Image: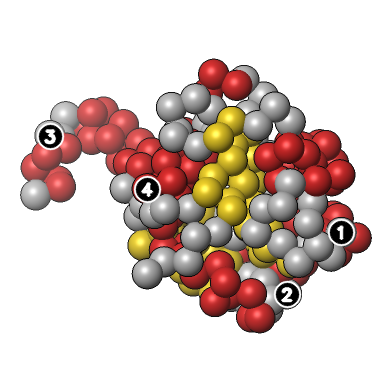
Amino acid sequence: MTEELTVSVLGTGIMGAAMARNLVGAGHAVRVWNRSPQKAAGTGATVAESPADAVRDADVIITMLYDGGTVRDVVGQAAPGLKAGALWLQTTTASLGDVAGLAATAAEHSVAFYDAPVLGTRQPAEAGQLTVLAAGPAAGRERLAPVLDAIAARVVWLGDDGARGDGTRLKLVANSWVLTVTHGAAELLALAGALGVDPDRFFR
């Protein structure tokens, strides 16, 4: 039987809302917060009025927000409710500088920090099939397992020090690869059109 945890999800856009729904479906007690409360409705989770209310007494906190700056702002608002010993999965794609600052904030509040950006889009998020690129203390991984099982098909562990940002480093490389492939495909199609070559013929 899966251990029931109290999980807070800060940010319920496309990805965060899907995570919250999957966590509710897995039997966890889930509280969510979003700047636009209407986006938090429909997740099946309890909608909190503030970040601090969302994280109060939470075992696990997930941040899935716009960028690192937004995470800093929201976690600053959440700080009064943070529980010492909680585990923070920071899944927002952020800069390395942001990751180091967020890890420092976690340490100030005795919260275990996990740098854990994800690979995937709406469909795998809704299906609980994301790939998580994670780095953080080994001691908390077993405790995190039920949460990761609910949102991900695969977790790639990259080290014990979340502050180093090893998950973010790999995510930035992966994003660059996607951009390179997309740009290359666009150039190929443009060249095919210019030369009168049917792209389907090339792909076959």
| First in sequence: mark 4 vs mark 1 | 4
Residue at 14% from the left image edge and 46% from the top image edge: 202
Q: Which residue: 44% across, 35% down?
A: 44
Number of numbered discs = 4
- Provide the secondary structure element on which disc 4 rests: helix
Judging by the rendered image, the residue that carries numbered circle 4 is 25
Secondary structure under tag 3 reads loop
Q: Nearer the viewer, mark 4 or mark 2?
A: 4
Classify mark 1: helix, strand or loop: loop
Q: Amino acid at mark 3?
A: Asp
Lower position in the chain sequence, tag 2 or tag 1? 1
Which residue is denoted by mark 3 in the rendering?
Answer: 198
CB of mark 4 within 8 Å of CB of mark 2? no
Residue 109 is tagged as: 1
Mark 4 and mark 2 lie on one chain; the one further toward the N terminus is 4
Residue 19 spot, x, y in % from top left = 46, 45
Image-based side of 99 in relation to 11, left or right: right
- Residues 51 and 134: in front is 51
Residue that label 2 marks: 161
Separation of disc 4 and disc 3 at Cα?
47 Å
Name the residue nearer the viewer: 119 or 186.
119
